[in-house]
Amino acid sequence: MSTPKISVIVNFYNGEKYLDKCLNSIINQNYRNIEIILWDNCSDDNSYKKIRNYTDDRIKYIFNKKKVPLYKARNDALLSSKGQLIAFLDCDDWWDENYLSSRKEFFYDKELDFFYSNANFFYQNVKKSKIYKKYQLPQGYIFDYLSKDYFLIISGIIFRKNIFTKYGLFNENYNIIGDYDYLLKISKFCKAHSINEPLLNYRVHEKNFSKLNSEMFFIEYKDWFDHNLHKDKDFLRNIKYFEKKLSYLEISHLLLNDKKNFNLIKKILKYKSIIGKIKFIILFLTPKKFFKYLKK
């Protein structure tokens, strides 16, 4: 039985710093039937010079002459793909060599629609790593799981391409939460298979959690929340979890825009019962200066 082709899509803008590690991790995969789509979103650094050094004929380089929003770039790259399966890998992340081959037996199960794995988080500034989830990752229809604990990393997911034909593409109005929006949409109808082994290496650095990204996340999430509030029965069933996330984001937004509030959050951290409630802020939304403040 022939193996299905996987289209690996790397969307990037000015990715010269990380491209080599990312691209080498794709080329060195044990699973060989792939095409590698490098979608350059109008970079003005030396990204192309790095790519020219690679002679692998599976590489398809596309230069977009005008910079477009991230999910427009994802959709355009996806539409140019030839594979039956789609995998995205952001250029600052990388895979273990058996990332693709570890799911091979499940590719033939037509009842499974997308596949995701655990991840190692690599903290660039402190040079340490941690496994993202230490418990058994859920399988099947995972909408409720995503409602409560939403963070699936798109670099760790493989989709059947027909999902995008049936349920549409990413919402191009978003710049940050397009993955989240799409996964919630399909997870009500599409079955997932999970691998607990951390086969994705996710790099945590300043650009991930900049003040600009944090504020944009808040704005987009609030817009997403308001849009779904009266339109989706599954959303309403889990509304308390979405409201909780929105509250975290509102607190974070307040902190980011008023330095005086750092004193308040320092006091809050003294109470163990509160720490869990602001974990989301600390792990995913807090800017570099807040981490420095907590170390004082």
Image: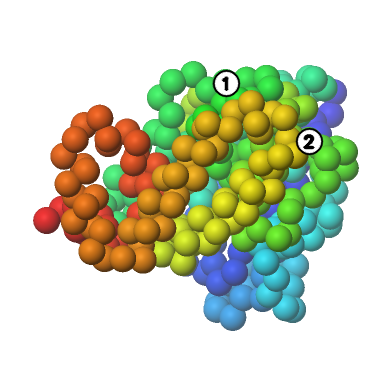
Q: Which of these two is toward me, 68 or 246?
A: 246
- The location of residue 229, given as percent across then percent down, is 66, 41
How many other residues sit within 10 Å of disc 2, few (<14), some (14-19) or many (≥20)? some
- The location of residue 10, given as percent across then percent down, is 65, 56
For residue 92, above or below residue 160: below
How many other residues sit within 10 Å of disc 1, few (<14), some (14-19) or many (≥20)? some
Kind of residue at disc 2: Arg
The tag on residue 160 is 2
The tag on residue 138 is 1
Q: Which of these two is toward me, 201 or 232?
A: 232
Q: How far, Cα to Cα, is label 1 from label 2? A: 19 Å
For residue 60, above or below residue 43: above
For residue 253, above or below residue 279: below
- The location of residue 47, given as percent across then percent down, is 58, 72
Residue that sits furthest to the front in the current view: 230
Q: Which of these two is toward me, 280 or 241?
A: 241
Kindly report which numbered mark, 1 or 2, lies closer to the viewer in this rendering: 1
Using the rendered image of the protein, determine whether residue 107 is visible from the camera's viewpoint. no
Q: Residue at x 64, y 48 (%)?
A: 226
Query: Left or right: 98 with respect to 184?
Result: left
Query: Left or right: 284 with respect to 178?
Result: left
Kind of residue at disc 1: Pro
